[in-house]
Image (tube, helix red, strand yellow):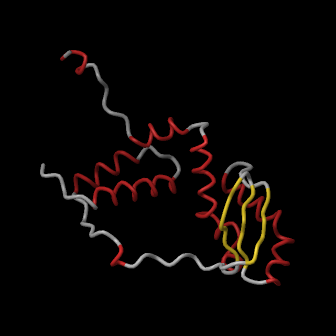
Amino acid sequence: MGNARSRMTRPRPVADLLTEALRGKPAERRLKEGRIWLLWDEAVGERIASVARPVGFRGGTLTVAVANAPWMQQLNFLKQGIMDKLNALLCGPVVTEIYLKAGRTEPPPAPSSEQRPPVRELTTVEKEFVREETESIEDPELRAIISRLMARHLASSPPDEA
């Protein structure tokens, strides 16, 4: 048994395993679809983003809440351009239709500090661990998201006594 352990290679970064495990699977598509919300402001610009927000996505159809009727009419003419821009940013034909509906367009309020569990500063070892585990993720947005999730998880538990 002892020699089997010595033949093991260095553990692979979580990012590699996630990318490999999700490739071609519905979860990979979900990650891409989720980026719509991150890319919306860039795709439509500040002015449109202030009056229209994505609120749902299903089967290629992006549902967008629009603040008022004049903007709804205006965005009807801009739908194809918005789809083209989003799909270019998503590197593929993810959005095939945009459905406009009247609705609230403010982003949800940030949770207040009272609702969050207390967090601590990460140790140097923990910061290095997060960096090593995520450095192989090519997509900078995805790398940042996974880094934040790992850091939040580590910060919500007591530090390891090394």
The quarter of the image holding the N terminus is top left
Residue 23 is drawn in which quadrant? top right
Q: How many marks?
A: 0
Q: Position of residue 17 (x, y in %)?
A: 44, 37
Residue 68 is drawn in which quadrant? bottom right
Q: Position of residue 63 (x, y in %)?
A: 72, 65
In the image shown, does 68 or 42 lie closer to the viewer? 68
In the image shown, does 34 or 40 lie closer to the viewer? 34
- At 60% across and 49% down in the image, what residue appears? 30
Q: Position of residue 97 (x, y in %)?
A: 79, 58
- At 62% across and 46% down in the image, what residue appears? 29
- At 46% across and 57% down in the image, what residue appears? 145
Q: Is 104 drawn above or below residue 77 in the view shown? A: below
In the image, 7: left or right of 149? left
Residue 67 is drawn in which quadrant? bottom right
Q: Is 88 drawn above or below residue 53 in the view shown? A: above
In the image, 153: left or right of 3? right
Q: Residue furthest left?
A: 161
- At 71% across and 55% down in the image, what residue appears? 88
Q: Position of residue 39 (x, y in %)?
A: 62, 63
